[in-house]
């Protein structure tokens, strides 16, 4: 075991997106630990060999004060987070009712995510909301453990300067440029211990114009650690940066896995529908092949249908009954026309007679 009794001379440079993954993935079968000295994360699960787990456990007991466990998100906290998003950020009444119904059922976490990823209007709002709330939770955890830190994603220093800061973590005397960079991150570390860091004020005034937001990927440096024990190196947790790493799921490792599973389910549904249609078509073909082999006596109506399908006009020979019926209809219509003409003539021939009035003598 390497010597860990060292003193750091500037705040730890941490990556927020790794804490985001650790806080969302930590559950009963997976444990995450934070190193207080250098700030790296350890991921312990049951997939490791017994020998590795035993050596890890032995090393953890020897340095129990150096490592602290990442807290696990409880069922109540998960439900409260989803309900807060629905009540604060979802404005459509039907969508709000559907999400609240999902939250009250089993497997609410995964079903909630699947519904959100199916509705792109709510997806961007959810990612922003979850990012902000998770950041507050991580800051509160680090403050509780009395750790001086800055998030590398929030720094505006050049990449080579950040690398030099990581290399000189345990060095007291450093060049002037590194000392000035230390002053910058010291001021930044103080901002995480203010009230506004965990309780941001709502922005006042006129809202800015809505423009297409372009999320620039932060320029992150390589990991530089000096005191990771050999027994801990297989458990080092160092996922790459992903702008959409807000899966909030314990089942899926990333958003890509979630989307892939959703596409797979949709594909299975489509394939089942196509299979049913193909079976019906096959049965219709089977029936039609049987009908072709059977000789059916053709009538005049069948000849007309066949001729209509072939595009040939056939003169239909009407029966005597149909002729009489058509003749009767023609006679009735003719009588009605005559009656209408006679009534019109009588209306025209009628004359209005004025009554003669006599004067009284």
Image: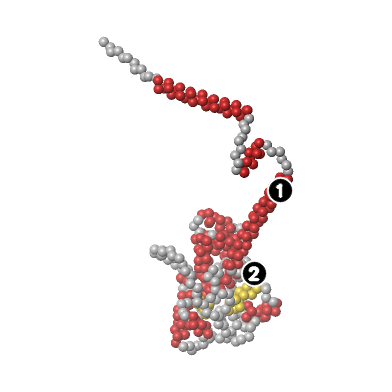
- Number of residues whose C-alpha sits closer than 10 Å to that of mark 1, classed few (under 14), some (14–19) or many (20 or more): few
Depth check: 26 or 190 in front?
A: 26
Q: Which quarter of the figure is the N terminus placed in?
A: bottom right
Looking at the image, which is closer to me, 47 or 200?
A: 47
Residue 20 percent coordinates (x, y)? 55, 71
Secondary structure of the residue carrying tag 2 is loop
Residue 54: image location, x then y, percent: 69, 79
Label 1: state its secondary structure: helix
Image point (64%, 55%), residue name: 273
User: Residue 113, image x and y in percent?
Assistant: 57, 62
Give the residue pinned by disc 1: 289
- 239 shown above or below 182: above
- Quadrant location, the C terminus: top left
Q: Earlier in the sequence, mark 1 or mark 2?
A: 2
Q: Position of residue 318 (x, y in %)?
A: 62, 31
Identify the colour scheme used: secondary structure
């Amino acid at each position: 075991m390497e010597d860990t009794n060292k003193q750091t001379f500037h705040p730890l440079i941490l990556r927020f997106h790794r804490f985001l993954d650790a806080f969302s993935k930590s559950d009963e079968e997976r444990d995450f630990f934070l190193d207080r000295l250098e700030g790296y994360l350890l991921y312990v699960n049951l997939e490791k060999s017994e020998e590795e787990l035993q050596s890890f456990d032995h090393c953890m007991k020897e340095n129990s004060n150096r490592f602290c466990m990442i807290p696990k998100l409880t069922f109540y906290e998960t439900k409260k987070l989803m309900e807060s998003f629905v009540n604060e950020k979802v404005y459509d009444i039907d969508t709000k009712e559907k999400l609240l119904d999902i939250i009250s059922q089993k497997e609410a976490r995964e079903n909630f995510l699947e519904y959100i990823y199916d509705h792109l209007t709510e997806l961007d709002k959810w990612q922003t909301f979850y990012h902000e709330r998770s950041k507050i939770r991580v800051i509160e955890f680090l403050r509780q453990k009395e750790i001086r830190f800055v998030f590398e994603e929030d720094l505006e220093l050049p990449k080579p300067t950040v690398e030099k800061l990581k290399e000189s973590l345990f060095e007291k005397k450093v060049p002037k440029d590194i000392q000035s960079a230390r002053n910058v991150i010291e001021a930044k570390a103080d901002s995480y211990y203010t009230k506004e860091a965990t309780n941001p004020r709502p922005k006042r005034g006129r809202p800015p114009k809505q423009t297409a937001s372009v999320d620039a990927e932060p320029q992150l440096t390589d990991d530089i650690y000096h005191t990771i024990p050999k027994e801990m190196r297989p458990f080092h947790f160092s996922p790459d940066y992903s702008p959409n790493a807000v899966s909030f799921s314990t089942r899926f490792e990333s958003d890509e896995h979630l989307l892939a599973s959703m596409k797979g389910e949709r594909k299975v549904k489509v394939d089942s529908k196509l299979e049913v249609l193909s079976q019906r078509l096959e049965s219709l073909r089977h029936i039609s092949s049987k009908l072709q082999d059977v000789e059916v006596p053709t009538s005049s109506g069948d000849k007309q249908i066949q001729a209509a399908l072939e595009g040939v006009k056939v003169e239909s020979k009407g029966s005597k009954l149909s002729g009489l019926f058509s003749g009767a209809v023609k006679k009735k219509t003719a009588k009605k026309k005559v009656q209408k003409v006679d009534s019109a003539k009588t209306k025209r021939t009628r004359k209005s007679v004025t009554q003669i009035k006599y004067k009284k003598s």
